[in-house]
Image (spheres, rainbow, N blue to C red):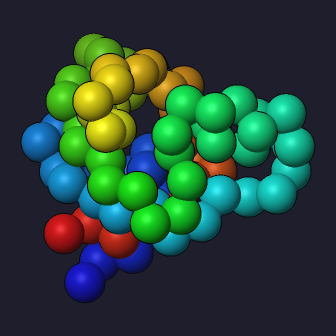
Amino acid sequence: MNQTSLSAANSADRCVVLGIASEPAEIKSRLYALGVIPGSALEILRLAPLGDPIQVKVGGSFISIRKAEANLIQVEIQ
């Protein structure tokens, strides 16, 4: 499969989270609280016109992630 950062994924891609950078710790803990944890499935719903932010479906929730935060998330595109 294709491993990359979440910021490089395209609209309508389905991904599995492989890992999140440990620094900065406050962003990692916020992403964990939102359900973005290793092994979780993500679906890219929309990209803003300039690619920032990214709207993602994780579980039953819809969240927006800044591109800088998406760079910290390693995913495998399905």
Outermost residue to the top: 49
Side of 37 relative to 3 (left or right): right
In the image, 15 versus 7, the foreground residue is 15
Q: Position of residue 33 (x, y in %)?
A: 64, 33
Q: Position of residue 27 (x, y in %)?
A: 76, 35
Side of 63 relative to 66 (left or right): left
Which quadrant: the C terminus?
bottom left
Q: Position of residue 2 (x, y in %)?
A: 29, 77
Side of 59 relative to 71 (left or right): left
Outermost residue to the left: 12
Q: Residue at x 24, y 38 (%)?
A: 44
Which quadrant: the N terminus?
bottom left
Q: Residue at x 35, y 70 (%)?
A: 76
Give the vertical position of 20 relative to 3 (above or below): above
Q: Quadrant of residue 14?
A: bottom left
Side of 34 relative to 28 (left or right): left
Q: Residue at x 32, y 21 (%)?
A: 62
